[in-house]
Image (cartoon, grey):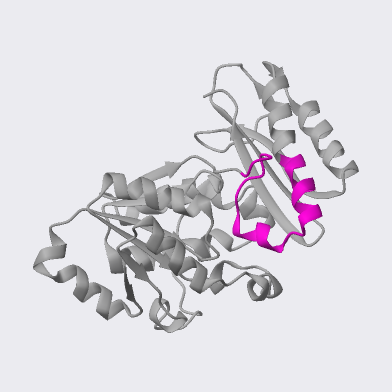
Amino acid sequence: MIIIKTAGDIINFFATTKVKTLTTGFVPTMGALHSGHISLITKAKKENDLVVCSIFVNPTQFNNAKDFEKYPVTIEQDIYLLEQAGCEVLFLPSVAEIYPNGLKTITHFELGFLDTVLEASFRPGHFQGVCQVVHRLLEIILPDKLYVGQKDFQQSMVLKKMAETNFPSLQIVICPTQREAGGLAMSSRNMRLTSTEKKHAVTISKALEYIKNNIMAGYIEDLKKNTIEYLSTQGFRVDYVEIADANTLKPLDYWNGKELIVVLIAAFLNEVRLIDNMIVND
């Protein structure tokens, strides 16, 4: 695996005659890699000649400075996992490489409704920060396909919206959420959970399964309220339990029994904020 740290070097790498004829799959990450990330690498390898992964902990997408400071960094282990998975290129830039003009000269991306609800509501500016870094990475790497996980459901929709305007030929591939044995969605933030908390965090995925198994056509507000109350009694501080149109993310109070819907949960377990989602009727 080749490790490249500057934008100039990776642009020159892709400009070589041998490389520029190859199809490229790109997996952007913030490191602290786990099997979920590696599943994206594996998928990208099956569908492209060359796979590029980036590791960059992006300061502009953190609302809380302490959250940014506590984000786990495991670069040696990350490199080992990527090599084992057969990743060909790792882009490992500094903040100055991604934001050469500084963090204050930020472009605003028109994301419409997606920038007002759920994660956007509880983490103002988060998706603007995500778009800043992914836009910059795509400008540098210019891949054919971008691979993201369904666990960040709203984020994948945001990136599709951004790409429609800025990278119309880019194909975005959304891959299934990878889960640990008990059902907990794999996340880098899980590293901050104690072993006891990790076992208890499975309650979120069980709540999703409960809604999936019990939802019926008609008014669904009580199902959401009951799930919030249940999670609260189990020690979670709930930001939201929402049932939404899976194509628009519009929250629903009434379901006609036909439209594709997604259940989304965000809740704190002590200091760690966890998110998860599940398509109900695919």
| Residue 282 visible in the shown view | yes
**Percent x, y of residue 213:** 69, 21
Q: Nearer the viewer, residue 6 or 114?
A: 6
Q: Of 110 and 51, which appears nearest the observer?
A: 51
**Height in image: 173 above or below 166?**
above
Which residues make up the magenta segment? 180-204
| Residue 23 place in picture, x, y as percent | 21, 53
In this rendering, position of residue 151 left or right of residue 134: right
At a point 44% along the width and 81% down the height, the residue shown is 94
Most common SS among magenta residues: helix
Residue pictured at 67% horizontal, 15% vertical:
217
- Please, which residue is most extreme toward the right here? 233
Quadrant housing the N terminus: bottom left
Q: Is residue 132 visible?
A: no
Is residue 152 within the magenta segment? no
Where residue 134 sits, quadrant-wise, is bottom left
Residue 49 x %, y % = 22, 53
> In the rendered view, would you say 101 is above or below 212?
below
Q: Quadrant of residue 80?
A: bottom left
Tell me if 266 is positioned left or right of 227 in this view: left
Return the residue nearer the eye: 85 or 254.
Answer: 85
